[in-house]
Amino acid sequence: MRRSMHVCRRGLISFDAKYLSEKPKLALDEKANINFPVVAAYFTEIYLDHLSTITFRTYDVLKDYPFTPKVAEELRFLESVIKRVENISAFDTSFVLIATWNNVKPSFNPYNTATFQLIIISSGEQTISFTIYGHNLMQWTTDKERIPLWIGHADIDRDIYSHIYSFSKNALQRDRYRKQEESVGFFLKI
């Protein structure tokens, strides 16, 4: 059981303590060399300027209920996304954290910005994290094939899951890979 969550400037959420590494490192086995409980939307060295913001909000059924109509609608939407992606008939939220990195810049290209969200949502029995890359909000680019950017999750026993494009420039501009009639942008369950 986790006691606390920390939204990190570097595009990740850590559990139980702040994660202090500046940027991800690639191990010899091509996995991220991380032995700390984290979930990463875009873990890299991030610069902030006067237009950049990092915000988060949480909703806890035990502390915040009854919810405002706006919050209740947002939770119903998140639950519907989970039911569709997981192909389940019910998901009742007990806790959610929504972190937003707005207009942030990577060290490998401090001239382009990106905006993305990492959501951790739990029913008490099942916890899911997913990332939202808003359409045309992911402006990071580079000429380098290998970059210090990791997408995935890890625990104290090291890397558990790395997205296939971690450490690759293919991880950039994730918002342009998919476009459907009802949604624009990109959703990644991690």
Image (cartoon, rainbow, N blue to C red):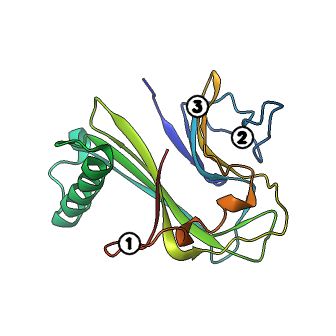
Is 177 situated above or below 51? Answer: above
Residue that appears at 63% across and 77% down = 51
Would you say the residues marked 2 and 3 are in contact, meaning their CB atoms lie under 8 Å apart? Answer: no
Q: Upstream in the sequence, badge 2 or badge 3? A: 2
Residue that badge 2 annotates: 20
- Quadrant assignment for the N terminus: top left
- Depth check, front residue: 108 or 102: 108
Q: Is residue 140 visible?
A: yes
| Residue 69 in which image quadrant | bottom left
Q: Nearer the viewer, mark 2 or mark 1?
A: 1
Q: Is residue 100 visible?
A: no
Residue that appears at 65% across and 75% down = 139
What residue type is disc 1 on? Gln
Q: CA distance from mark 1 to mark 3?
A: 33 Å
Residue that badge 3 annotates: 37
Count neighbours of disc 3 (C-alpha within 10 A) and say few if under 14, some if 14 to 19, many if 20 or more: many
Would you say the residues marked 2 and 1 are in contact, meaning their CB atoms lie under 8 Å apart? Answer: no
Q: Nearer the viewer, mark 1 or mark 3?
A: 1
Where disc 1 sits, the SS reads: loop
Where disc 2 sits, the SS reads: loop
- Depth check, front residue: 183 or 154: 183
| Residue 108 in which image quadrant | bottom right
Q: Position of residue 61 (x, y in %)?
A: 22, 42
Residue that appears at 19% across and 58% down = 72
Q: CA distance from mark 2 to mark 3?
A: 12 Å
Where disc 3 sits, the SS reads: loop
| Residue 161's disc number | none
Q: Position of residue 39 (x, y in %)?
A: 55, 42
Residue that badge 1 annotates: 180
